[in-house]
Amino acid sequence: MFLASQIHLRKAFFDGENFSLNKIELSAFMPWFICEVPEFDDDSEEPVCTTTHLIGDIDDLAKFAGSRKIDKTYVISPGHLLNQDNWSLTRLKAISSATYQDDEYKSTVYRFETDTGQVIEHDISGLNKDKNELTFETILQFN
């Protein structure tokens, strides 16, 4: 979920002037998604423009994909999900999921397949269950 807020910074930091900054926050424990969507006029066969949408949740992405024709989808991965120092932006081909039970806790593992052949797996519980024991089902497929 995105959190939108407006920060009012103190005058002392900006030479006595009031300053406000609009911002949007999103927890970075899951990847984010960017979708490029062609927009058409009523009678047009060619897109008049392409809009870009930032989506922060897999369920929201599934709803969005079900209601629009998406041209391209990208996965934005925080560095800690990839065990790297930098964030990654890669074109997305598919999302799969698998669910498992660990003692009394039920968890889901998401698999993000990219157009470069890279596979990013993320266990939302952080338990990092052995992924070889899981059966993944494709939940979203992209062009």
Image (spheres, rainbow, N blue to C red):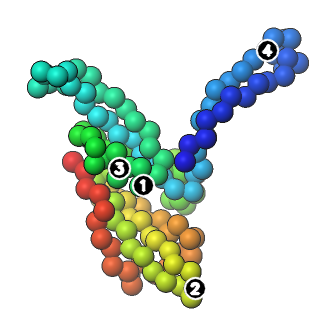
In percent of width and height, residue 132 lies at 38, 81
Can you identify the residue that label 1 sits on? 58
- Location of residue 39 with respect to 86 vertically, above or below: above
- Location of residue 21 with respect to 67 vertically, above or below: above
Looking at the rendered structure, the secondary structure element under dot 3 is: helix
Q: Which mark is residue 104?
A: 2
Q: Which mark is residue 18?
A: 4
The three-letter amino acid code for the residue at tag 1 is Ile
Looking at the rendered structure, the secondary structure element under dot 4 is: loop
Left or right relative to 125: residue 63: left
The three-letter amino acid code for the residue at tag 4 is Asn
Label 3 neighbour load within 10 Å: few <14, some 14-19, many 20+: few
Residue drawn at x 30%, y 62% is 139
User: Disc 2 to disc 4, how far (Cα)?
Assistant: 52 Å
User: Disc 2 to disc 1, how far (Cα)?
Assistant: 24 Å
Can you identify the residue that label 3 sits on? 63
The three-letter amino acid code for the residue at tag 2 is Glu
